Image: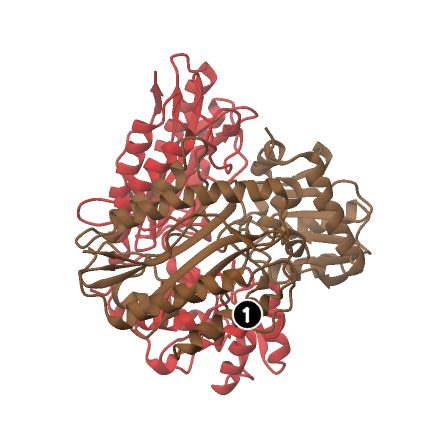
Chain colours: A brown, B red
Amino acid sequence: MALFTHAEYRARLEKTKQRMAAAEIEVLIVADPANMNYLTGYDGWSFYVPQVVIVALDAAEPVWIGRGMDANGARQTTYLQEANICGYSDDHVQSEVKHPMNFVADEIRRRGWARRSIGVEMDAYYFSARCFAVLQKDLPEADFKDGNLLVAWVRVVKSDREIAYMQQAGKIMERVMQTAIDTVAPGIRECDAVAEIYRAQMRGTGDFGGDYPAIVPMMPTGEKTATPHLTWTDEPYGNETAVNLELAACRHRYHSPLARTMYLGSRPPVKLTDTADIVVEGLHAALEAVKPGVLCEAVELTWRKVIARAGLEKESRIGYSMGLNYPPDWGEHTASLRAGDKTALQPNMTFHMILGMWMDDWGFECSESFRVTATGHETFADFPRKLFIKN
Amino acid sequence: MALFTHAEYRARLEKTKQRMAAAEIEVLIVADPANMNYLTGYDGWSFYVPQVVIVALDAAEPVWIGRGMDANGARQTTYLQEANICGYSDDHVQSEVKHPMNFVADEIRRRGWARRSIGVEMDAYYFSARCFAVLQKDLPEADFKDGNLLVAWVRVVKSDREIAYMQQAGKIMERVMQTAIDTVAPGIRECDAVAEIYRAQMRGTGDFGGDYPAIVPMMPTGEKTATPHLTWTDEPYGNETAVNLELAACRHRYHSPLARTMYLGSRPPVKLTDTADIVVEGLHAALEAVKPGVLCEAVELTWRKVIARAGLEKESRIGYSMGLNYPPDWGEHTASLRAGDKTALQPNMTFHMILGMWMDDWGFECSESFRVTATGHETFADFPRKLFIKN
């Protein structure tokens, strides 16, 4: 069974074209792998070489361009006709001679689009400075415009089928977090706990398996809890120490992240338990503030008021839109739950609300992934919100 | 224990500065996470926001610039002084208001480097078109030059300590591949086999644990073996079908990849067994051609002559330099084993030689990771080279 109906792909393409027309972009070069997947279904770990999907206002179908050996992957995962799957030869790959964007420019010219207004995703991960420089050189008559996040903003509101995959990811996530809490213990090597977490992420449930999340398990412990993005070692977990667990589960590239904090030992510091209490209260309050029409910044303000009562403040945002994605990030880079973000919530927007307080030598974090419903919110996973203390 | 001595980091920096001087680059902005790690030790999953290491010819130490919440990570993983660890505020993150490269440009100006010749890694994965555009706008007096792969070429020849980590990865790799061959079987869900492989990758050995490889397990089966980069499903493996296994193990970000092919069933097609025989013969011959002074293209030619005798040809390269890396690729994008590559082999260069023949509806692949020795080569893993047939 295809992951989505052809009608759903057509609707995505139509919404993309409407935004293109509004931005006066006639041809959009999409390099972000999540956007490529969203528009065509293409799914492969091939984004380590330049590849794009091109949407033109006057073309019925997008065009996939990638490495020759990946064209069969496009034939198997997209709905595109053969004429719209174009593979470049291998002498373009990591080569001094030719760049894949030379091929993309040639294909644009061949299709009569060389003089159009051409949108590019200026800040997409895999659209390098050279990618753009080659396009500018090879297409001097084109009028380049910034189409960054254009498709990502179409992705912000999910379809029911997309929500179903995120709900499945949420079910997997419950097992993943339980595995983490069952496994992490004093004397257990960090890498061995990570091993069980990965296993749970991929096994999924008896009904459906897991896909690789866009970010690896984040499980800092001890002094590393003072910073969120260090990965594991092969040292054993200590005693009387905290462990932050920021994990995710993924289904058909749709994510449901979840964060919790453990304390290993019998004497959790009062500052940690106090922080846990106030963060969990703030998480609850912020989630209760979610409903259609509310602005993203208002959700953050609710949280900020709660922690201010405890004399705490947090500079960084408390959440972001997420869903379909590839490494290095499951976030969509569109709406953020932070001061100044005027995005109004709509049903089936999906966020990861992550409340992390990272102090100089310890940290506490707790999160939920949820969708906006007609009247409020619905989390994807059902897991206790508390500091998990393990003696 | 630090992963490398301070002396080793200094030597890396000196070699980088020599290449910078030769390229008339006074200040180099390094955005590639592997290059950042190589020069400073920085290791974190934070490359989903712009971050850089800056090397200036007239500065004794590099400067790390990243997100504020990751500065503690830099303090914990690098040898840099506090003055050379600079975190930007969170309103730079995925924001319409400020871009992290505004902060980088300010820091360059503050240090008196705004009028220098500044190298940038034009084709690095996380150096987007916008990153470069912001730098150009904010530093109009600078003379920008392409410093792409400048550090990567320093990385090509490994130190003994780096080799030791790759050898450890090779030991893990043997267990990972054995786990794959033991687990993959008709009726087993692909995701469940992947789960055991991930578990083996992270557990490592009793002496040392594993790190996350830069590429997920690639295990196409059935018609998907006709293309190399599709990932797994939750369907059970079939019978009378081939499975390609392209896997890796990783130790402290140093990789040792390995590929093998299985056939599930009792009647492997003659074209598959014949191809396996000739590919294994070609792999052996190409590895025997490896020694210091031999050109990369000569190694590939040895392979090409072997398969030509069987009437086969392969367009794509047969290997590439690899070692330290982050997603999305463990390859270094420098030397490739392919026609036209005149790089002369030197001791402690390290390659993944991967011989994949992907036909329209089936494929066979077999690979080795190895280092060049004083007299030949040494593989990192010891694993039989053959088609694994499982009834």
Q: Position of residue A186 (x, y in %)?
A: 18, 55
Q: Position of residue B132 (x, y in %)?
A: 59, 69
From this view, report whether residue A114 is shown above or below residue B86: above
Residue A141 in sight = no
For mark 1, what is the residue? A338
Q: Name which quarter of the figure residue A266 lies in.
A: bottom left
Q: Position of residue B205 (x, y in %)?
A: 21, 44
Mark 1, chain letter? A
Q: Residue at x 52, y 29 (%)?
A: B224
Amino acid type at mark 1: Arg
Q: Residue at x 52, y 58 (%)?
A: B125
Q: Quadrant of the N terminus of chain A?
A: top right
- Give the camera-side residue of B206 and A264: A264
From the viewer's perspective, tell me whether residue A349 is left or right of residue B383: right
Q: Secondary structure at mark 1?
A: loop
From this view, report whether residue B187 is shown above or below residue A228: above
- Give the camera-side residue of A202 and A385: A385
From this view, report whether residue B354 is shown above or below residue A57: above
Q: Position of residue B182 (x, y in %)?
A: 29, 27
Q: Quadrant of the C terminus of chain A?
A: bottom left
From the viewer's perspective, tell me whether residue A193 is left or right of residue A256: left
Q: Residues within 10 Å of mark 1 (few under 14, many from 20)?
A: many
